Image (spheres, helix red, strand yellow):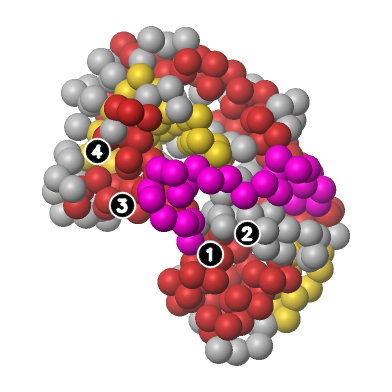
Amino acid sequence: MIVVTGATGNVGRVLTRTLAEVGEQVTAVSRHAAAVPDGVRHLAADLAEPAGLEPVLTGAKALFLLLSGDLHAVGASPTDIIGKAAASGVRRVVLLSSLGVASRPFGTTRLAMRELEDALRESGLDWVILRPGGFASNALWWAESVRAHRVVPAPFGDIGVPVIDPADIAEVAAVCLLDDQHTGGVYELTGPQVITPRQQTEAIAAALGAPVRFHELTRDEAKAAMAESMPAELADDTLDILGSPNPAELRVSPDVQRILGRAPRSFADWATRNVTAFR
């Protein structure tokens, strides 16, 4: 049995379905009740309370670990989850980390994620670490504004990074959960090219078949909006990357191609598949 945390999110939902379709027994974990594919068990649990994870992890051979936003905050203790997994008999963990651990190792939230990576390496478990850059699905932050006003409000309009489709992350995670040859691997996951918010706006407009205007926010305006759904420290670390990406954050990684045998999907492909969110 494979446990998927964050199972109702943009990565976990696809990963749960992918594993179920190849015949794996899957336990989908989220904080609240949720619909899951046929044959998948769903359990509600809060990763911020590792003591309550025993019924989730009992009988599991592998764990996909995706931290909820509050576990990125200063003072959180996500390393406790690794100890609980090992004590419950889990043998393999695939951790969804962040490219920022390598590209900005001293960022506030990156230090905590580095500690989690180190705890996993030292746990005695089989492990794989996935380090994605920016997510294409972060564009869903703009969905309400696009639906209501045909406007994308975002900072740093002409500064881009190679955002990755969460479906690609999910497919890579599935391979790493099922194939022992990836044990001990650390993979950087990006999209196929650097794309700016203004170019993402154009891709959304093309998917809609309607004009969409780009409106540039100041950093402070963007932080205020982001802080409604994530710790302020994570918002700051994210904006540091979006506003001034370094060479490591601009690099297009070959790891999706290496693991899946195909190029990563483009942002335009993501926008076309998710266009109903913007209508």
Q: Is residue 37 above or below residue 102?
A: below
| Residue 234 screen position, x and y as percent | 68, 39
At label 4, the amino acid type is Thr
For label 4, the crowd category at 10 Å Cα-Cα, with few meaning under 14, some 14 to 19 and many 20 or more, is many
Relative to 206, 5 lies left or right: left
Q: Is residue 219 above or below residue 158?
A: above
| Residue 242 screen position, x and y as percent | 75, 51
- Report the magenta residues as a range: 240-265
Front position among marks 1 and 4: 1
Task: Give the camera-side residue of 182 and 33.
Answer: 182
Instruction: Say which residue appears at 31% left-offset and 11% top-offset.
Output: 87
| Residue 126 screen position, x and y as percent | 35, 19
Q: Regarding mark 1 in the picture, which secondary structure is present there?
A: loop
Q: CA distance from mark 2 to mark 1?
A: 8 Å
At label 2, the amino acid type is Gln
At label 3, the amino acid type is Ala
- Sequence order check, earlier mark of 2 and 1: 2
Q: Quadrant of the N terminus?
A: top left
Q: Which mark is residue 266?
A: 1
Front position among marks 4 and 3: 4
Q: Is residue 180 above or below residue 249?
A: above
- Sequence order check, earlier mark of 3 and 2: 3
CB within 8 Å, label 4 to label 2: no
Q: CA distance from mark 3 to mark 2?
A: 34 Å
Q: Which mark is residue 34?
A: 3
Q: Regarding mark 4 in the picture, which secondary structure is present there?
A: strand
Task: Give the camera-side residue of 163 and 218.
Answer: 163
At label 1, the amino acid type is Ser
- Sequence order check, earlier mark of 1 and 3: 3
- Sequence order check, earlier mark of 4 and 3: 4
Instruction: Say which residue appears at 55% left-offset and 89% top-offset.
Output: 209
